[in-house]
Image (cartoon, grey):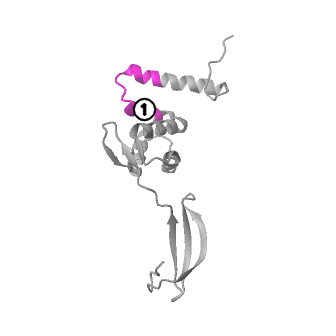
Amino acid sequence: MRCPACNHVEDKVVDSRLSRAARSIRRRRECLACGKRFTTYEQVEHEPLSVRKTTGAIEPYDRAKLLRSIGTACAKRPVSLAMIEEVVDRIEEAIEAADHREISSQSIGEHVMEQLRALDQVAYVRFASVYRNFQDTTEFMEEVRELVNKARYRARGQQDLFGSETKPEEG
């Protein structure tokens, strides 16, 4: 690593620690020639991720675009920017875990809906209405009805062995 003060190439590492949600390592270095201290960051270099659109076009993955679309769905909701960034982090972790260099926009949309359903149901319905391209109010109402039913079942604490909700028994 070249010293930013004197351009000398030899230094020693004074301190190392995880940084940025354990995605990089922060190293504090000291130049052996001039004694100046400086900081460097190391992170794994990933192959760029591509997104295959429904039209078949391929474009580079853009975190900012994902943040904007989730932010739009969460507008005027009690959802902070930090919460939105956590959602995007979880989506990116799921994408990275799949270990593909190309992902469909549908797959990203499904990840977003899964995360928004747990975060804020109004934001979920907003996103779903655009993502699923509801053509009439019947489709929209069906989605809302499903959310309400799931919330009722969860409130009663009734889930089957596989984690999905089951109808409560009448009587």
Q: Amino acid at mark 1?
A: Ala
Q: Horizontal placement of 69 versus 55: left or right?
A: right
Q: Residue furthest top?
A: 171
Prevailing secondary structure class for the magenta stretch in the rendered image: helix
Residue drawn at x 50%, y 38% as measured from the top left: 116
Q: Quadrant of the C terminus?
A: top right
The residue under the point 48% across, 83% down is 9
Q: Residue at x 34, y 40 (%)?
A: 53
Q: Secondary structure at mark 1?
A: helix
Q: Which residue in the protein does label 1 denote? A: 128
Q: Is residue 26 within the magenta segment?
A: no
Crowd rating for badge 1 (residues with CA inside 10 Å; few <14, some 14–19, many 20+):
many
- In terms of depth relative to the viewer, which is nearer, 68 or 37? 37
Magenta span contains residue 142:
yes
Q: Is residue 145 above or below residue 37?
A: above
Q: Position of residue 122 (x, y in %)?
A: 47, 33
Q: What segment carries the magenta color? A: 124-143
